[in-house]
Image (cartoon, rainbow, N blue to C red):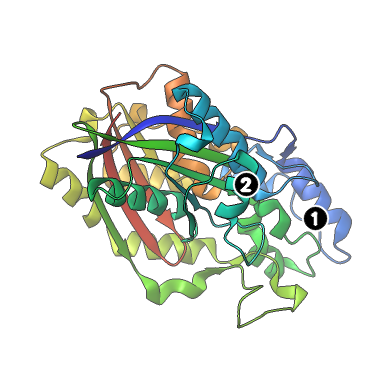
């Protein structure tokens, strides 16, 4: 039995904030520092990002996307036999946000969260694949809701702190969902994952854990984008090139190659290293920013809406995340 992705959808909040507005807010809220004009867009290629309403939660973004995939398949919430919330964000420390998503959807199936930075959704898909192939479930809803706008540092004291907080200025709120169902053929046919955990300190959101349970200064993203990129590049393209070798495929055999998108310059570095043809990538960064774990399903949903992929087409999912984590998954829709 295979696990086939039968529906995919993304949900992006209506409100957008431009990179110029990001710089203006930092300048307005920082007593002693003003960013260089246009620095955010010049460094990242991001023109705008989405910001959810004050009365919205990460679970709401996941629910909006989940309702779309269920409607596409004409499946009621009661027809889902497992719900996985795979996200770097969460509504609360406890309980699992998957419970909140299920309650809002009206689903009564078992649920759990999967958390692994920007690879959270991909790892949720990995779990759905494994549980379907082993016969434990037949229809799994994998969803995410990312709310990084709640953890961006706007008041910075100097250039060093601005650089440390810079990764947050690329981030965007968003939700996504995939319905994964048991099928006799097609579906997910290759998966592999790796980690370079010695680099875990490169990018963090420290608050809420046992290290920093209550200090408000730890409620902001902290990271070194250059060191994170170097950690990815140093780990090499082996996991991705091996995937092609083991399956006997080339990137040209895929209708779409979804690559986690952080900045445009970094996306081009990865594309060049891996040899992915530019016409296989759906670039979502300029208008939608880095939507964390929702990035890969957003790209697939965008490509489907544009007619670039559909039933029977192969798609590749290439995941990169803080930690550091890497992942690759091939599927036939």
Does label 2 or label 1 sit earlier along the sequence?
1
Cα–Cα span, label 2 and label 1: 37 Å
x 39%, y 54%: residue: 123
Tell me the SS state at disc 1. helix
* Label 2 Cα crowd, 10 Å radius (few <14 / some 14-19 / many 20+): few
x 55%, y 53%: residue: 98
x 65%, y 49%: residue: 58
Whether residue 75 is visible: yes
Tell me the SS state at disc 2. helix
Which residue in the rendered view is the most extreme toward the top?
307
Picture disc at residue 103: 2
Q: Which residue is mark 1?
A: 26
x 77%, y 49%: residue: 23
* Label 1 Cα crowd, 10 Å radius (few <14 / some 14-19 / many 20+): some
Q: Nearer the viewer, mark 2 or mark 1?
A: 2
Above or below, 90 against 39 in this view is below
Which residue in the rendered view is the most extreme toward the bottom?
211
Residue nearest the observer in this picture, 206 or 139: 139
Residue 232: x percent and y percent?
37, 60
Give the quarter of the image for residue 253. top left
Give the quarter of the image for residue 15. top right
Above or below, 214 against 224 in this view is below
């Amino acid at each position: 039995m295979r696990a086939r992705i039968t529906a995919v959808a993304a949900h992006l909040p209506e409100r957008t904030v431009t990179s110029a507005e990001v710089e203006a807010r930092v300048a307005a809220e920082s007593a002693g520092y003003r960013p260089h004009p246009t620095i955010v867009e010049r460094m990242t290629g991001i023109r705008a990002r989405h910001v959810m309403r004050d009365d919205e939660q990460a679970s709401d973004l996941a629910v909006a996307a989940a309702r779309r995939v269920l409607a596409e398949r004409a499946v009621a919430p009661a027809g889902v036999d497992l719900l996985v919330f795979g996200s770097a964000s969460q509504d609360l420390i406890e309980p699992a946000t998957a419970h909140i998503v299920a309650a809002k959807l009206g689903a009564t199936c078992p649920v759990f969260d999967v958390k692994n930075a920007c690879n959270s959704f991909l790892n949720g898909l990995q779990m759905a694949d494994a549980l379907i192939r082993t016969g434990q479930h037949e229809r799994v809803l994998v969803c995410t809701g990312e709310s990084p706008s709640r953890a961006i540092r706007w008041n910075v004291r100097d250039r060093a702190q601005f650089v440390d907080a810079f990764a947050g200025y690329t981030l965007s709120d968003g939700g996504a969902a995939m319905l994964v169902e048991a099928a006799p053929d097609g579906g997910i046919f290759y998966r592999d994952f790796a980690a370079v955990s010695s680099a875990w300190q490169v990018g963090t959101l420290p608050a809420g854990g046992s290290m920093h349970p209550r200090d408000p200064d730890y409620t902001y993203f902290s990271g070194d984008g250059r060191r994170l990129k170097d950690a990815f590049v140093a780990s090499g393209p082996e996991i991705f090139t091996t995937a092609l070798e083991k399956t006997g495929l080339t990137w040209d055999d895929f209708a779409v190659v979804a690559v986690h998108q952080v900045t445009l310059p970094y996306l081009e570095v990865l594309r060049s290293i891996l040899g992915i043809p530019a016409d296989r990538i759906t670039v979502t960064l300029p208008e939608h920013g880095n939507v964390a774990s929702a990035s890969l399903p957003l790209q697939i949903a965008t490509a489907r809406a544009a007619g670039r992929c559909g039933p029977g087409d192969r798609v590749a999912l290439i995941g990169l995340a803080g930690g550091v984590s890497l992942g690759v998954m091939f599927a036939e829709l």
